[in-house]
Amino acid sequence: MKKNDFLKGLADGLPICFGYISVAFAFGISTVSAGLGVIEAVLISMTNVTSAGQLAAVPIIAAGGTLVEMAASQLVINLRYSLMSVSLSQKLDKGVSLLHRAVIAFVNTDEVFAVASAQKGSVSKYYMYGLILTPYLGWSLGTLLGAVAGDVLPGVVTSALGIAIYGMFVAVVVPAAKQSKATALCVVFAMGLSCLFRFVPALSAVPEGFVIIICAVSASAVFALAKPVEISETEVCADE
């Protein structure tokens, strides 16, 4: 059972891994172009695993910004991960210890969270370790390849590689939206809120990190009250 859970996690994480390689490749190129070294670029990815946070951090590092600037930018951009981790903690088997939860939270990205949340019933630590392993390796490998490539490739190519992340989100969201009208409406509602923050002058000044949090929490709260989802007590796998 433990082996099956781990292998299923690996399989579910492979699409995320392939998507991360292309995005991280572009990050690696941009990091080296900003003046950082290959090793520095790879270490940033291996110790952070957050595309938006890393992309925001590199210009601050290159410009010699302060630690306060760095901390503030990362807090705003990555605050949503605390919400996702709280939610994901309810999905884990009760036997998953604090140490294992901390390791899993380290690679709790948007895509990992979406895939884990879509599983029926609770998930074991073995499934989660399989799910986070391939994306982590893909993110690190992509950064290494991009950093080594440097500025050899033209800018239009590296920009195009970033589109892969949106395709990956579509692949995660669309199946769930097709199965549930409430889920589809929740997605549309969140998209509408996001557009308001983008195009309404009074709201456009709100930092992107907070916009994501506001849209996600608001849409989830509205549809949790209007159309609550009934979850059965299904045991998918045992932790022992």
Image (cartoon, rainbow, N blue to C red):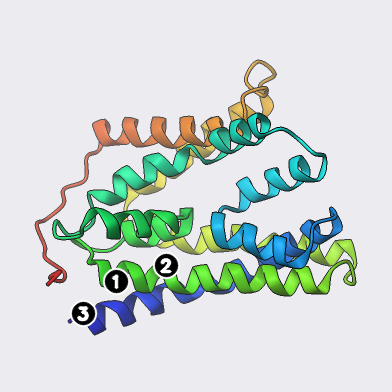
Q: CA distance from mark 3 to mark 2?
A: 16 Å
Q: Tell which circle, 1 or 2, labels the residue nearer the N-terminal end.
A: 1
Q: Are marks 1 and 3 in contact (CB under 8 Å)?
A: no
Q: CA distance from mark 1 to mark 2?
A: 9 Å
Kindly indicate the quadrant of the structure image that contains residue 1. Answer: bottom left
**Label 1, on which residue?**
127
Position in image of residue 60 (x %, y %): 75, 40
Position in image of residue 186 (x %, y %): 39, 41
Q: Nearer the viewer, residue 90 or 182?
A: 90
Kindly indicate the quadrant of the structure image that contains residue 43. Answer: bottom right
Q: Secondary structure at mark 3?
A: helix
**Quick check: 133 above or below 165?**
below
Q: Amino acid at mark 3?
A: Lys
Q: Secondary structure at mark 2?
A: helix
**Label 2, on which residue?**
132
Q: Secondary structure at mark 1?
A: helix
Image-based side of 138 in relation to 236, left or right: right
Q: Are marks 3 and 2 in contact (CB under 8 Å)?
A: no
**Quick check: 220 above or below 106?**
above
Image-based side of 174 in relation to 222, left or right: right
**Label 3, on which residue?**
2
